[in-house]
Amino acid sequence: MALSAARRLSTTASSSSVADAPPKLSSLFQNPKPRPLPVRGVEEPRRGARPRPRQPWEEEAGALLLRLHKGRYLPGPDLSSAPHAVSPDAVKTAAEWFGHDHQPVAKWLSGSDLKKLALFGCPTVERRTVFASKRLRAFFNIQEDKICGSCKLRSSCKFVNQEVARHNRVILSDTMRIISLFVLDACPQELEITAELKASVCKLLKDAINLSS
């Protein structure tokens, strides 16, 4: 009887050691478990937040794209009727070149509207646009800490409170680069565009287009 118990104990120990042994590498590639099919009517969890679809300001975005297309600043077909399909990066670069070629227009733009644009802050944390905004603020002697201190993009900006040299004129290429992001709705969604600011942006764009024609 003692011998029989010993055999059962040995068999149990042997089975336990086999169960605890790690699987062989080859077994990991044999008969993989199929992924479960999604259940109809049940939405799978998202891996990350989807970007908010852009909502360009139809009239203003169309006017800007048409002017850039006619001036050959924006290559390709005329997409003024489909601003959603245009890359904001391509447009802001084209708008900047437009500003370079029409600098004299800047002196005829509304000072009060330009100042509202300057006080808003930066419409993005992208370097060239940030420094364009800083130069506009410097023209109006607006202190950087006043704007950066309350900026909603502060945590992701590399140029917080950084000063720039003051110019004695408004640089139209900077202004057009900034304006293009507003009318294409290419600003981060954390930023709140007030009706007052929108009105100023629209007026500045309209005047820039009309005075350059």
Image (cartoon, helix red, strand yellow):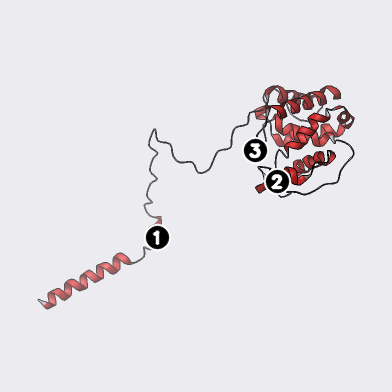
Quarter of the C terminus within the rendering: top right
Q: Please say if 22 is above or below 68.
A: below
Q: Of circles 1 and 3, which is in front?
A: 3
Quarter residue 81 falls in: top right
**Secondary-structure class at tag 1:** helix
Residue holding disc 3? 188
Q: Residue furthest bottom?
A: 2
For the point 68% across and 23% down, the residue is 58
Q: Residue furthest left?
A: 1
Q: CA distance from mark 1 to mark 3?
A: 50 Å
Where residue 209 appears, as percent x and y from the top left, is 81, 24
Residue under numbered circle 2: 149
Q: Nearer the viewer, mark 2 or mark 1?
A: 2
**Whether residue 94 can be seen here:** no
Please state the horizontal and vertical placement of residue 68, each as a whole percent of the image. 78, 27
Q: Are marks 2 and 1 in contact (CB under 8 Å)?
A: no
Q: Residues within 10 Å of mark 1 (few under 14, many from 20)?
A: few
Q: Could you tell me which residue is drawn at 12 percent across and 78 percent down?
A: 2
